[in-house]
Structure formats: C-alpha cells, structure tokens
Image: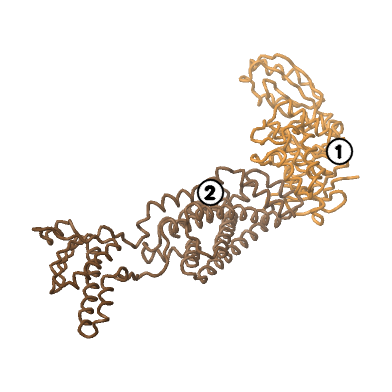
Chain colours: A orange, B brown
Amino acid sequence: MNVLEIRNLTKKFDDFIAVDNMNLSVREGEIFGFLGANGAGKSTTINMVSSLLRTTKGEIELLGRNIAKHPKFAKSNIGIVPQDLAIYEEMTAYENVSFFAGLYGLRGSELKERTIEALDFVGLGDKHKSLPKNFSGGMKRRLNIACAIAHRPKLIIMDEPTVGIDPQSRNYILNSVRKLNRMGCTIIYTSHYMEEVEELCTRIAIVDHGKIIAEGSKEQLKSIITDTKEIWIAVKSEGAVDLESLKRLQGVTAVRLEDQTIKINSKAEINNLNWIIQQLIKDQVEIRSVEEQAPNLETVFLTLTGRNLRD
Amino acid sequence: MNVLHIALHEIKLSLRDKRTFIFMMAFPVVLMLILGTALTNAFTSGATVEGLNLLVRNTASDARLTAAWSGFEQAIAKEGVVAKPIEEGMDGREAVQEDLYTAYAEIGDDGIRFYGSSKHTIESNILQGMLTTFADRYNLAAAAIKAAPSDAEAILGSAGAAGGIVRETTLDPDRKPNSVDYYAVVMTTMIGLYACMSASYLIRGERKRNTMTRLSASPVSKGEIFMGKVIGSSFINSMCVIVVFLFSKLAFQADWGDHYGIVLLILVTEVLLAVSLGLGVSYLFKENSAGAVMNVFVQIASFIGGAYFPLEVMGTSMRVVSELSPLRWANRGLMNVIYFDDWGAAWGAVGLNLAFAAAFLAVSVISMRRREAL
C-alpha cells in the first residue's frame, strides 16, 4: 500500500516552475530518501505534502485520501522535522513537546504519556525540565524530532535532521530513525550526507529541476550508471592541480577536488588512467595514491544531475 | 479547545520573557512615582496661608467695644491669627513694612484703621476681611442699641464669636486630579498601548523561530491559531495593566473614581486595540520593520496623548493632533468618568477602541488569508 501518492504535481512561483509535473509514490514502511541539490524542488514538494504550500496543479494523496479535500486528516497523520530547528528556546523540553502534541488534539493523561514517551524515545527523558537554550546542537535536533513524533504520525518527513551535529548525536538520530521505522512509521528522509541516505533508505528518488530523474533502490540507482567509473587520486598539494586539463582528456565526464583528492568520473569503456597520470606528472602534481571506486550514490547523483549534492 | 491551548501557550511564553514582563510592570510605576512627585506643583491651584500676625493698637474707651474686640481676638486666634498689642513707642506701619507683621490695625472709638502688607497680599486681605466683618457686626450692634437694646447683646456676642468670620467659597468646584492621580491614569493607559509592540511579534516571532512551520503543518486552522494568539496576548497584557492599576490605587492612593467597571472596560478594550494594531502592522510591514514602526508609533502616541504632561499646557493645534492618539481617547474617557461621572466620553473611548480593534483585526485576517502559510 502506498502511504503517499503524488500525481502530476506542479508548483509555480510566478513564472518559475519549482516542481514540474512530478509523480512519486512512497510505500508503507519505507525509509524513502529524497535527494536533490539546493533549488531542485525538494523542499517545495515537501511543503506541499505538509500542506504548507498550495499546489498549482496535480494531486497528493495520503493513505488514499486527497490532502486538499481532507487537510485535517492529512495533517494529523504527518509529522514534520524541519531542517531549521522549530522549538521554543524559553520553554522546557516537556513544554515544547506537550504544546505541539496538544495541537493534534491530545489532552490530559494521554498528552502527558505521549510527551514523556517522545522525550524518552530521543533520549531526553531526564532533561524534560531543561530549557533548550542550555542544550547542545545534537540535543536540540533530538528535541526537534520529539516534537514531530508525539502524536504518532503514519508518515514522518525529516528534512536534514542531522545537519551540523556531532557524530555521536548523528548516530543516535540515525538509530532513532530506524527504530521509528521498525515501529511502523513511514519516513521521507532528505539529507546532504549521501552516506546517511545510502545507509538508511530503502528507496531513493533524485529530484532535479522540479522533476524526479531517477527512483529506486540503491542497487537499482547504481545499476543505471554501469557505463561510468570513478577514479580517486590522492595528491600532496592541491595548488598545482589543473582541473580543466583533466576535463579535456578523452572519456572524462566530471572532475572535482575534495580534501586533497581528485575525483574523476569517466566513461567505463575508455581506459584513460595512464593519460590522467601523465597529465598530473606534466603539471608537477605529486601523486600519493590512485584508486578506482565502485559506483556509489554520490557518483550516481553527479552523473545524473551534473552537480554535487552539496551544490 | 485548540484556541484555548494556543492562548495558554501564548500566556506562558509571555511570562517566560521576564525582562519584558518586568519592564511592563516597573516602567509605568517608576514613571508614576517620578513624574507624580516632580510635577506636583503643576497640578495644584491652591496656596498655603500661614503666619497671620496682626499688630493691634487698641485705644478704644467704650467698654462694649473693648469687650467685643477681646472676644474677636479669641475667635480669630482659633483661625490661626495671632493678634499682638503694640508696644509703647513702636510704629505699627513701619513694623509691617519691615515684614515683622502681616497687618496693623488701630482700634479707636471712631473706627478701625487697617494697614496691610504689600508683600503678603493674600494674608493681609484675609485679615482685612475679618476686621471688616467685625466692624460690620459691631456697627449693627451699635445701631441696635438704639432701637432694640435686648437684641444688641446677642449681636455683640456674635461679633466676637468663633467661625463664620470668613466663609470659604471657590471658583473651581469640580474635582481635579493631583499629579499622582493624573500620572496613574496616563501611565496605565500608556502601558496598555505598549501591548502593540509585543503583538507585532506574535506572528513574526513564530516565523523567526521557525515554529510557524510546525503550527501551519498541524491540524489547527489559521483562524484558531490567530484567535488563540490574540486572546492570549490580550489577556496577559490586560493583566499587566490591571496590576499597574491596582498598584497605583493601593500604593500611591491614586484616585480612580468609583466606577471601576467602566474604568477596566476602557483599559481592556484599549489593550485589545493595541494587540490588533500590532498584529495588523506586522502583516502590513516587512518582518523587523513592523517592530520599529510600532516603537515609533508608541512614543509619538504617548507624547501627543498626554502621557508625559497634561494636554492643557499644549497649544490648540497640538490638542487637535492629540485626537489621533488612542491614548487621548482613553485618557479623556477615564478622566471624565472618574472626575465628572461623565459616562459619555467613557463609552466613546470603548466604542473607538473596539471599532479600531475590529478594523485592524480585519486587516490582519485578510492579509493572513492571502498568504499560503500564516
């Protein structure tokens, strides 16, 4: 059964088409990765699903019901974890969760139980009387999640839930996402960290210029680019690297430099490694190591969109 | 139920902002104290009269006159007048010129001569009035002796009787506020208007905190969120105003009249107007500029609305301009109902407050509906 069904969805802001005739379905029990560079139309789509924006055209169905016709039903069954922290710093963790859960009609002892349950779930049970302004970034992110789950939504939309936090808190959040999924929640997950998406998501959609350009499991997406290979060359100094000369080499489709590593995408059938190394030697670049990588989501994304996820 | 949930949350949120809350309470109280004390003289039309010293030379040989004068001296002593017999060789007029006495009177069988001090005209006029009264009564008694001797005794007795020598009358019979009374009223209404500043942040604050996303994504309508916020903000600001009202009444003994119901109604409707104004402006102006607009508005409205000094000292054109200030309506309504039992201006203030509140709420609702989110 599909929890979310998007059909011919379009959103225009004056003449700019942010979402262009998009079709998408999210199945029950999935952790669905929604990938796109900045401005690809990802947030606009999420905002329309959350009823924060009106659609220009098309339909969105949640659990089989049109959200435009049943907005209360849709809103009651969705939990939002926005990218920007959406909490009251001057209210305690308990008061934050309790207030937002109260908006979903929870009252009295049920409200108390659900609030405590949500705080315990994100590991803030013992901090329920503390003010978020005294929390670390990771704790605030966890509270941000607790505020979205106390009403037990069927679909949780997580927009960059791990941005800007320490590895420990990130692991905690990723484990929480898996746990929520095991408890029966369907999750739409967006992130700029490709490894998170690769690790968590059962299915992934890549959105570019307002359209879904690829959709499927990790393996299905990787299989799209069997004709591409990625070569990583670690260098001693970035200064002398001439990326333009590398791009001109036969078979090379994309070149980028990250942390003293030249990452080259190339057509698989062309054996151009020798030419690449010769070019680097000619440019007097000191090579430390050379590796050929198996295609990953990053490569898929780059190949399909021509952009990095963080662009 | 959702409206109540949001209203309670708004009240809690306001109480957590301790700095603003303390400011809302302490600012008017401190200003009441400072302005009320410093500008006491600007509000009083009375003058204190003291030190009435009358120098007397009594050369009368008539026993009746001497007895009547003696009684008169005792009577005016009770009114605070010290009548001192002149010493041998002393010049009474010189003593008055040298400011040793307020006035000098020579009592003789042929009448009374009075010399008042030009330095203390009020005091010397009072003494002159007292002596004129004595002379009139004595002359009446002298005339009565000839016609009805039995009545003359009674008249003579009254000539020197206590009381009734000077009857106090006034040209200004209406009650007037003293400085503390005045500033208690205008500071309370001013702090009511300050609600517009916090109200301009009601929706803006949610956007700034990003909590607007959660509110808009919840199954609560825009109208419920809006109502909850207006009710919560109006309630907490009304409570602030009522606390200031009670403090001024109990601690400063400010005169708020006898009609507390209408007084509170004016104050509460003024807060509602301020909250609606703040909300309306927050929809009409971009983000932070709404706060700046409200800040400037409150200062100007307070200045021309009589919050810092009474409008009576302003020129005609300024008084016309002052009619644009909501504080002017509220202050006039309150002063009229407190001091003249005039309910017309009070109901006028309530009506204007509610009408403008409705207009600004309508502006906010229309703007809110046009937006995709709140």
Could you give the CA–CA distance between mark 1 and mark 2, rounded to whole angstroms?
A: 54 Å
Pointer 2 local density, CA inside 10 Å: few below 14, some 14–19, many at least 20:
some
Q: Amino acid at mark 2?
A: Met
Q: Nearer the viewer, residue B169 or A157?
A: B169
Residue holding disc 1: A30
Pointer 1 local density, CA inside 10 Å: few below 14, some 14–19, many at least 20:
many
Query: What is the x, y in percent for residue B6?
Result: 69, 51
Q: Secondary structure at mark 2?
A: helix
- Residue extending farthest to the left is B89
On screen, residue B108 above or below A220: below
Mark 2 and mark 1 in contact (Cβ < 8 Å)? no
On screen, residue A239 above or below B17: above
User: Residue B25: which numbered mark, if any?
Assistant: 2
Q: Where does the C terminus of chain A fall, quadrant-wise?
A: top right
Q: Secondary structure at mark 1?
A: loop
Q: Chain of mark 2?
A: B
Q: Chain of mark 1?
A: A
On screen, residue A62 above or below A195: below
Query: What is the x, y in percent for residue B63?
Result: 17, 72
Query: What is the x, y in percent for residue B356?
Result: 57, 64
- Position of B261 compared to B210: left or right? left
Residue at 71% x, 17% y: name it.
A277
- Residue extending farthest to the bottom is B147
